[in-house]
C-alpha cells in the first residue's frame, strides 16, 4: 500500500482538481437538499458575524449553488459576484439567485489574480478553501481587499470525517492495486491554522472558531451515498476505476458498519473551522 501511495503521489500526474469538479457537477441538482440544508445555519452564522455594510463590494469564492452569495447580497446594494469552477453548481446558482447575484465560472485563484488591488471590501469562501491553495488564496485576498476589508472563511477541517477516511484507507489496504487516483487536498487543521495564516499575512483575526455537526444513517451503503451526495467525499468516488467501484464501495460499506455501527446506526461527523480576518 505504501508503494502504491508513493507511486500515485510522486510519479502519476495528479488530476484531483478535475475529479472534484466532476463530482460537484454530478451532485449539483441535489446538493442544496443534502448539504446546504444540513450546514446552512453554520454558513449563515458566519455571514452574520461579518459587519457587512450596504456600500460594500463583495465576492463569494467557491460559491457552489449560491446560498452564501445570496445572504451577502441581501445586506449590500452592490451585486455580489459568486465564483466557482463547477458548471453544474453554477447552473443551480443561476437558477436560484440569478436575479440578485452575478456568477462567474472560473478557478478561484486565477479569478483573484485577475482582480485589481484594493478593490473589494469583503471576500468570503464557504466550504471550498481546502480544494485550492489556502495560503495563495489568502495572499491574493489580502491584495484585493481595501484597507480594513474583511475575509470570512468556513471549511471542513483536515480530519473532518476522519472515521470515514480511516475506513477508506482500510478498504484500499485490502486492494492497493485498485487505487488509481489519490485525492490530494489542502484542508487546514483547525481555526488556529487559519489564524496562523492570517498573522503570516499581517491580517488581524477578528474571529476564529471550530465545531462539528453530525447525522446518523442506518447502513454503510446509505452513509456512502450521502457522503457522495454532499461533496464531503468529492473525488473519492473516482479513487478506483469504474469497473472496480462496486466492489470497493461494497467493502467500504462493510468496514464502516464493522467499525462504527452502534445501535443499528452509524454517526457521520463533519468537523469544521471558521474565521474572519481583517486587512
Image (cartoon, helix red, strand yellow):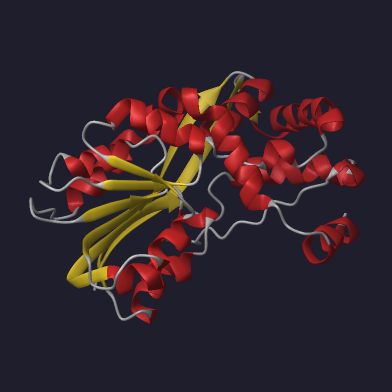
Which is nearer the eye, 52 or 208?
52
| Residue 209 in view in this figure | no
Which residue is at 39% across, 73% downward? Answer: 139
Question: Seen in the image, is 74 located left or right of residue 87?
Answer: left
Instruction: Find residue 231 and report its image quarter.
Output: top right
Q: Nearer the viewer, residue 96 or 186?
A: 96
Left-right relation of 212 to 141: right
Pick whichever, 33 or 61, lies toward us.
Answer: 61
**Residue 208 versus residue 24 in the image, above or below:** below
Residue 9 quadrant: bottom right
Q: Which residue lies furthest to the left in this view?
A: 54
Residue 90 place in picture, x, y as percent: 42, 36
- Which image quadrant: the N terminus? bottom right
Quadrant holding the C terminus: bottom left
* Figure disc tally: 0
Residue 212 % position (x, y):
42, 44
Quarter residue 267 falls in: top right
**Could you tell whether 224 is left or right of 215 in the image?**
right
Amino acid at each position: 500500500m505504501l508503494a502504491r501511495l508513493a507511486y500515485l503521489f510522486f510519479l502519476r500526474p495528479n488530476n484531483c482538481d478535475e475529479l472534484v469538479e466532476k463530482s460537484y457537477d454530478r451532485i449539483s441538482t441535489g446538493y442544496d437538499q443534502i448539504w446546504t440544508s444540513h450546514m446552512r445555519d453554520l454558513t449563515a452564522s458566519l455571514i452574520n458575524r461579518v459587519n457587512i455594510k450596504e456600500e460594500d463590494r463583495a465576492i463569494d469564492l467557491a460559491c457552489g449553488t449560491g446560498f452564501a452569495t445570496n445572504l451577502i447580497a441581501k445586506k449590500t446594494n452592490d451585486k455580489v459576484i459568486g465564483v466557482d469552477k463547477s458548471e453544474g453548481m453554477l447552473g443551480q446558482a443561476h437558477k436560484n439567485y440569478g436575479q440578485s447575484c452575478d456568477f462567474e465560472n472560473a478557478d478561484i485563484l486565477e479569478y483573484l489574480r485577475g482582480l485589481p488591488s484594493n478593490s473589494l471590501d469583503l471576500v468570503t469562501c464557504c466550504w471550498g478553501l481546502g480544494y485550492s491553495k489556502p495560503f495563495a488564496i489568502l495572499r491574493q485576498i489580502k491584495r484585493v481587499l481595501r484597507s480594513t476589508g474583511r475575509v470570512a472563511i468556513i471549511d471542513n477541517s483536515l480530519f473532518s470525517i476522519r472515521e470515514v477516511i480511516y475506513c477508506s484507507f482500510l478498504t484500499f489496504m485490502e486492494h492497493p492495486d485498485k487505487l488509481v487516483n489519490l485525492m490530494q487536498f489542502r484542508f487546514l487543521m483547525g481555526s488556529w491554522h487559519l489564524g496562523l495564516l492570517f498573522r503570516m499575512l499581517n491580517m488581524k483575526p477578528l474571529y476564529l472558531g471550530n465545531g462539528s455537526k453530525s447525522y446518523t444513517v442506518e447502513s454503510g451503503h446509505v452513509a456512502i451515498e450521502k457522503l457522495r451526495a454532499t461533496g464531503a467525499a468529492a473525488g473519492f468516488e473516482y479513487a478506483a476505476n469504474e469497473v472496480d467501484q462496486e466492489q470497493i464501495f461494497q467493502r467500504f460499506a462493510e468496514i464502516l458498519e464493522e467499525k462504527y455501527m452502534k445501535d443499528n446506526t452509524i454517526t457521520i461527523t463533519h468537523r469544521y473551522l471558521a474565521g474572519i480576518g481583517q486587512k
